[in-house]
Amino acid sequence: MSEQTLNLLIENAANSVEMEGYKIDDQSKIWCKQLINKEITMKEYIELIKKKAGVA
């Protein structure tokens, strides 16, 4: 998948979530891209999101 396509898919997903009233920041988009590119695992992704949200 091209970088441009991946960025478009992430932006579309973020826009969809934001229509529901949530805000997706740039860092979360970076982590999402890293997950898709298998640079981090799902477990690592979840831990990063939980830590960012202040959930232990």
Image (tube, rainbow, N blue to C red):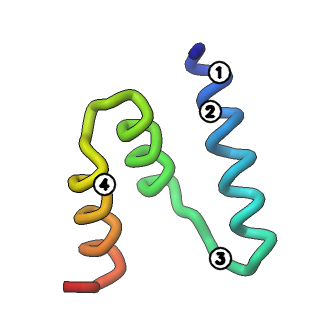
- Residue at 60% across, 28% down: 6
Which label was assigned to residue 45?
Answer: 4
Report the Cα–Cα distance between label 2 and label 1: 5 Å
Residue type at mark 1 is Gln
Q: Are marks 3 and 1 in contact (CB under 8 Å)?
A: no
* Image x and y of residue 41, in percent: 25, 43
**Which quadrant of the structure image shows residue 17?**
bottom right
Q: Are marks 2 and 4 in contact (CB under 8 Å)?
A: no
- Residue at 69% across, 51% down: 13
Report the Cα–Cα distance between label 2 and label 4: 18 Å
Q: Which residue is mark 2?
A: 7
Residue type at mark 3 is Tyr
Q: Are marks 2 and 1 in contact (CB under 8 Å)?
A: yes
Disc nearest the viewer among 4 and 1: 4
Q: Secondary structure at mark 4?
A: helix
Which label was assigned to residue 33?
Answer: none
Q: Which residue is mark 3?
A: 22
Q: Secondary structure at mark 2?
A: helix
Residue type at mark 4 is Tyr
Q: Secondary structure at mark 3?
A: loop
Image quadrant in which the C terminus is located: bottom left
In the drawing, does residue 46 fall left or right of residue 2? Answer: left
Which of the two labelled residues, at mark 4 and mark 1, occupies the earlier sequence position?
1
Report the Cα–Cα distance between label 3 and label 4: 18 Å
In the drawing, does residue 29 fall left or right of residue 56? Answer: right
Which label was assigned to residue 4?
Answer: 1
**Above-or-below relation of 4 to 54:** above
